[in-house]
Amino acid sequence: MSIQINWISSDEQLLERCQHWNTLDFIALDTEFIRVDTFYPIAGLLQVSDTEKTYLIDPLLIDNWQPLAEVFGNQRVVKVLHACGEDLEVFALLTGALPEPLFDTQLAAGYLNIGFSMGYSRLVLELLGIELPKGETRSNWLQRPLSDLQVEYAAQDTAYLVEVYRALVQQLSEQKYAWVLEDGAALVAAAQKTTDPYELWRSVKLAWKLSPQQLAVLRILSAWREQQARQRNVPRNRIIRESTLWALAYEQPVSMAHLAKLEDMHPRILRNEGKILLDMISQAKGLPPEEWPDPLPEPLPVEASKILKRLRKVGLDLAKDLNIAPEVMLRKKILEELLRTGYPEGPYHLPDSLQGWRRELMGDALLNCLEGV
């Protein structure tokens, strides 16, 4: 397959192409970025393929992203991506918009029971019989000029994605196609949510072991770490490790000497942030009990695993009937949320996280499975 590559390196060129893309049924999208020492990804390249050509957009030379944002919002143009989680963040940062409707080819492969969480190269081989060369994923995508290998690799990412989409659409029923778009909409909705720094304590490992008073300390420390990571544009662990946050909330040191004794306390953190940490701990300790967070639920007991297995079988049976990869049906997290609504004696109700066609097709069966538990 010969790939015709065209560069877009000015606002005028982008506007012209976007006017054309707005007339199409679908386009294929991808990004190349670097995210090693930063909190936010740094875009190095955007790739767009239509049915005729492949375009490489140089984000270092574009100032006005509004035309592409308008394409993203055009509901008549399907946007095709593969495993698009991080790409969505890049698009949001650059354009302030997200591509809708979104068709994720990795999800679509699951709906056809070709495989779950398949890599792009493997899916291209499976559907097109083409073996792609080793990638340049870890390249420096900010260097200019890009190497010939980088350009070839980037162009292949969307050029073959056009053909992958066509092959998938031929095999997908109308219903399954709609389900893929429904899951794509859920991905976009999740990417649009703004994370409240003061809610991040809930996801800290082993936070459920802490008392409400200790959780008040963990809450302020987790929020501070997130805010600092965003402001400084560095990874969260560059500010302070999550395990250190937990230790601080548990022990609540009152002096620099005590801070220094914590197993995970890095000397740099102690030197630069020690006083701030002590002040925040003191502030949280001064909160009245009514302002403490509610305790987190403990992990489900071992005995619950038998019930989870029965619930999972509901999804497995339906997956078999529909010829869908089992992993696409129900995530373990959703089943655990369902069980928590009434464990151990009930009554149970469907969690908000079970939505769309899954709720419609499996909701009653899951609840019936819990009757008499």
Image (spheres, grey):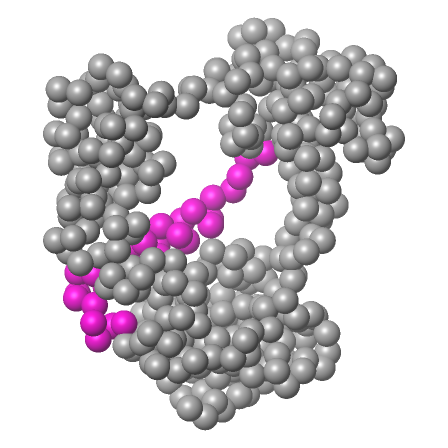
Identify the main secondary structure in magenta.
Answer: helix
Q: Residue at x 59, y 62 (%)?
A: 94
Where, quadrant-wise, is the C terminus in this rendering?
top left
Q: Does the magenta stretch include residue 161?
A: no
Say which of 27 and 128 sits in front.
128
Q: Is residue 56 left or right of residue 257?
A: left
Q: Position of residue 221 (x, y in %)?
A: 67, 26
Asked if one can make out residue 127 in the rendered structure from this viewpoint, the answer is yes
Q: Position of residue 90 (x, y in %)?
A: 56, 60
Quarter of image, res 253: top right
Say which of 162 and 17 sits in front.
162
Q: Residue at x 68, y 80 (%)?
A: 146
Q: Over which residues does the magenta segment extend?
A: 168-197
Where, quadrant-wise, is the N terminus in this rendering?
bottom left
Q: Is residue 316 left or right of residue 166?
A: left
Q: Which residue is drawn at 87% across and 31% down?
A: 271
The image shows residue 120, relative to residue 97, as above or below, that is below
The total number of labels drawn is 0
Say which of 249 and 307 sits in front.
307
Q: Is residue 161 left or right of residue 112?
A: right
Q: Position of residue 349 (x, y in %)?
A: 23, 26
| Residue projecting furthest to the top | 289
The image shows residue 131, relative to residue 219, as above or below, that is below
Asked if one can make out residue 11 in the rendered structure from this viewpoint, the answer is no
Q: In this view, does 150 lie to the left or right of 282?
A: left
Quarter of image, res 26: bottom left
The image shows residue 132, relative to residue 252, as above or below, that is below
Q: Is residue 178 magenta?
A: yes
Q: Position of residue 348 (x, y in %)?
A: 22, 23
Q: Residue at x 58, y 77 (%)?
A: 57
Quarter of image, res 101: bottom left
